Amino acid sequence: MPNWKMPKVLTSEITPKDVYRQRREFMRLAAGTALGVALPSHLIAGEKLPTLVKSAYELPDKLTPFEDVTHYNNYYEFGTDKESPAQQAGSLKTRPWTVTVEGEVRNPKVWDIDSLMKLAALEERVYRLRCVEAWSMVIPWVGFPLAELIKRAEPTGNAKFVEFTTLNDPIQMPGVNSPVLDWPYREGLRMDEAMHPLTLLTFGLYGEVLPNQNGAPVRIVVPWKYGFKSAKSIVRIKFMEQMPVSSWMKAGPSEYGFYSNVNPSVDHPRWSQAKERRIGDFFKRPSLPFNGYADQVAQLYSGMDLQKNF
Ligand code: MTE
């Protein structure tokens, strides 16, 4: 295994937000508290989320301001422009909420969201999010490795892939009445990608419960892939022998491949992927292979032609 350590810069040193500094102090105090004790039974968007484990995953990059992270979103169930999710996702009811774990597993289970949140220690991890539209952000996510849930599900030898499915409710989600995608929103990973320690089952950001527009109550974050792989508001995790077909693969097979690793040398058919604009920056910057996580993940793809497996 390569060295996982990211540069050790506390987010408190790189964000201007006083509020956030205080929150970090709160989290530091919460660290060391026995798991479960510090987590209230029910948390709603905007509430503080105690981070129980100080993570090694920090970046020297400046954090994208909370306001941009929560008001410039892609969440097509709430409209296709960037402002719509913040305006419309308030209608999403995140309790009660269950996540069904099923398919090729010995231990299928319907998880209540509040029990799921307590399954493993929550960590804050600062990850880059790179969208296929060539913008990017740096976000302090809160969650735990998806591998923690997968281990408990006990996948069978037939489990080669994992599929994530988002809620599909036309009453709460006006966007699913439009045929822009094949609903429900589906995404998938290969088992080794899903088990990779960077793949985060995510419940919060900036130390708070996820705002609805960012995928409350639970989403995936896969930092070395284009943002659309990180499915929001998931209700089902299914283990499969066959490669799942994602909503984006159905919508444009020549534009969106299954792997979708950030790759500056493979252009999207309609635009270049060589550069990206960090939200808040004026100039573009070169995009990095695997979004800067090559040391950690490149070996997952050794021997594969990444031009073909885009
Ligand atoms: N998940 C669902 N269910 N619906 C979506 O439209 N958009 C994806 C991804 N997850 C999307 C989704 C895309 S294209 C991106 S870039 C990220 O969410 C954006 O996450 P953010 O709004 O929290 O930054």
Image (cartoon, grey):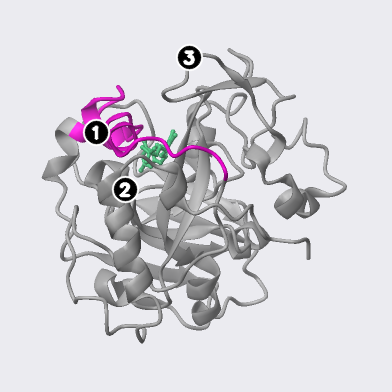
Q: Residue at x 53, y 26 (%)?
A: 252
As drawn, 225 above or below 54: above
Residue 207 placed where, x, y %? 32, 57
Q: Which dot, 2 or 3, sits closer to the camera?
A: 3
- Say which residue appears at 13% left-offset and 42% top-offset: 90
Between discs 2 and 1, the one toward the N terminus: 1
**Is disc 2 surrounded by few (<14), some (14 to 19) or many (20+) residues within 10 Å?**
many
The disc placed on residue 282 is 3
Q: Is residue 85 left or right of residue 126?
A: left
State how far apart marks 3 and 1 are (Cα): 24 Å
Residue position for label 2: 215
Nearest to the eye among marks 3 and 1: give it.
Answer: 3
Label 2 close to label 1 by CB (< 8 Å): no
Give the quarter of the image for residue 182.
top left
In front of the other: 129 or 266:
129
Quadrant of ligand 1: it is top left
Quadrant location of the N terminus in the rendered image? bottom right
Residue that mark 1 sits on: 85
Q: CA distance from mark 2 to mark 1?
A: 10 Å
